[in-house]
Amino acid sequence: MDIIISINKPKGITSQDAVTRVKKILKVKKAGHTGTLDPLATGLLLVCVNRATRLATYFSGLDKQYRAVMKLGETTDSQDACGSILEERDITGVTREGLEETLRLFTGKILQIPPMFSALKHKGKTLYSYARKGVEIERTPREVLIRELVLEDISLPFAVFRVVCSKGTYVRTLCHDIGARLGTGAHLSGLERRAIGQFHLEESLSFDELRVINEGEKITKGVYSMDEALSWMPEIKIRESMVRAVIHGNPIGLSSMDVTDELRTSPGIRVKSPEGTLMAVGSYSPLNNEIKMDVVFS
């Protein structure tokens, strides 16, 4: 059972709690998620099972889509509704047009200062462990890409927006920074992850649905083989003479005719046997015009 499962995580549990539930339901020892959702957040969580855990980094690098609820007029120490209120400000001057104009300023490449209440580490300790002691650590701004930022609804003090963003984006920091730009302050009140790359929330499973699958019932969504889950990657089918090299993790050479822009730029390449079985995931190395093996399954 080397699979990737799309889970609809409910509010109030950690991502690791969700992984633990999957392991208990499926009776497997090895599983892991591809990107944390805070307990406040709901929505799509990808869980890799058994050998598929070796692929987690490929999914964590995909763009994410969220539906966020932002509360204007309040800042909190955690930048979300779980924190303590630091400041309250008047919001009577906020209009839909003004908010939409502000959102446009946060589209594209932007810099974010990671929040203190995060799992990033400083001297071997998580930032949130310092934050709980009231210690502020200087953080270096990081560049992230906001591909899409659209206001969906506004009913003050709340505003709902859709965001499509790159790996490493903190949506609560985005809310905090938008509030700072408006001069009202803001924090994240609710969050739902709606997509990770080509995976969508509508296709995900609840824990009850996963139990039904484990009991033998057939559900045609939310469970993917490794090859299916990596379908967004280009693939190359090797010749029989190359099989032994791939099995042993050795690179395989390419002729100039084999190399496409997609192969050059993709973070991963599915390497398949002559029969079409997924054998490995590799990456293009321009130095010797070859594909080196990063993860080998056979």
Image (spheres, helix red, strand yellow):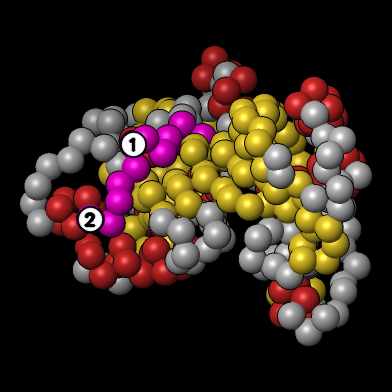
In the rendered structure, the answer to whether residue 62 lies left or right of residue 10 reads right
- Nearest to N terminus: mark 1 or mark 2: 1
Residue at 9% from the left image edge and 47% from the top image edge: 217
Give the amino acid at mark 1: Glu
In the rendered structure, the answer to whether residue 283 lies left or right of residue 50 reads right
Give the amino acid at mark 2: Asp
Residue at 80% from the left image edge and 23% from the top image edge: 97
**Residue for badge 1:** 203
Mark 2 residue element: helix
Instruction: Note whether 276 is above or below 90 in the view shown.
Output: above
Instruction: Note whether 143 is above or below 13 in the view shown.
Output: above
Q: What stretch is highlighted in magenta?
A: 197-208
Residue at 45% from the left image edge and 47% from the top image edge: 43
Q: Do the residues labelled 1 and 2 touch (CB within 8 Å)?
A: no
Q: Does the magenta stretch include residue 185?
A: no
Residue at 89% from the left image edge and 41% from the top image edge: 181
Residue 76 shows in this picture: yes
Mark 1 neighbour density, 10 Å: few (under 14) some (14–19) many (20 or more): some
Furthest-front residue in this view? 92
Mark 2 neighbour density, 10 Å: few (under 14) some (14–19) many (20 or more): few
Furthest-bottom residue in this view? 133
Q: Nearer the viewer, mark 1 or mark 2?
A: 2
Which of these two is toward me, 2 or 76? 76
Mark 1 residue element: helix
Furthest-left residue in this view? 216
The mark total stands at 2
**Residue for badge 2:** 208
Residue 261: mark in rendering: none
